[in-house]
Image: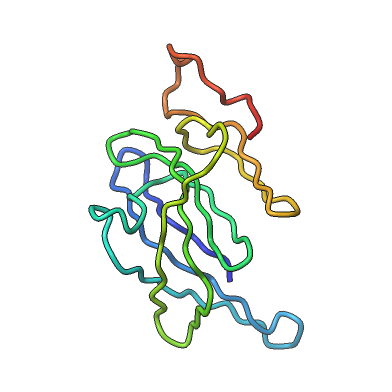
């Protein structure tokens, strides 16, 4: 399955919906692709799931869908890292899967949106570029040219 989180149009509402596109039968004569909503227990207010964002990037690693960054409603960018537990996910019915905020060691990338992200081998995930959603050069120093 391919997982998606958040979204929304610029200068419009953003959301924190999660969905999956599950692919089956691609080796045979009857390939199928099925969209599925992924429900999550808890709420943003109780810090049990990510805030609505757009321009977020995610990757699947082992049994986790990990997301980074994005732009919240109102324009503030984030550098939050969240993980959706995919262990035991079954798509026979709408799955309910829990999120958890990940506390990461080391120097984190600054808050950003529309960055590039690439999963490499051995659990490495590279983050590069992005912006804070302005068209002029930021007044404060930024690290958008640093590879994390």
- Say whether residue 83 is left or right of residue 53: right
Q: Where is residue 74 in the image (x, y as percent from the top left)?
A: 27, 36
Considering every residue shown, the one lying at the far left of the view is 45
According to the image, what is the colour scheme of the structure? rainbow
Snapshot quadrant of residue 127: top right
Q: Is residue 19 left or right of residue 33?
A: left
Residue sitting farthest toward the front: 105
Which of 102/137 is in front? 102
124 vs 69, left or right, is right
Q: In which quarter of the image is the C terminus?
A: top right
- Residue in front for this viewpoint, 58 or 74: 58
Q: Which residue is drawn at 76% across and 82% down?
A: 27
- Give the camera-side residue of 115 and 106: 106
Residue 25 position, x and y percent, is 68, 84
Which residue is at a point 40% across and 67% down the rendered structure image? 98
Considering depth in this image, is 14 or 82 the residue closer to the camera?
82
Residue beneath the point at 41% across and 85% down: 93
85 horizontally vs 16: left or right? right
> In the rendered view of the protein, which quadrant contains the N terminus?
bottom right
């Amino acid at each position: 399955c391919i997982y998606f989180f958040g979204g929304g149009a610029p200068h419009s509402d953003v959301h924190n919906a999660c969905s999956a596109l599950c692919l089956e039968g691609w080796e045979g004569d009857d390939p199928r692709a099925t969209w599925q909503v992924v429900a999550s227990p808890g709420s943003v207010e109780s810090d049990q799931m990510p805030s609505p964002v757009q321009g977020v990037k995610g990757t699947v690693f082992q049994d986790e869908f990990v997301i980074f960054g994005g732009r919240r409603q109102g324009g503030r960018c984030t550098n939050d890292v969240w993980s959706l537990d995919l262990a035991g996910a079954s798509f026979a019915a709408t799955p309910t899967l829990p999120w958890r905020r990940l506390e990461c060691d080391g120097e984190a990338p600054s808050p950003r949106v529309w960055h590039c992200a690439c999963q490499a081998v051995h659990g490495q995930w590279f983050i590069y570029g992005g912006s804070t959603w302005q068209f002029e050069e930021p007044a404060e120093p930024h690290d958008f040219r640093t590879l994390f």
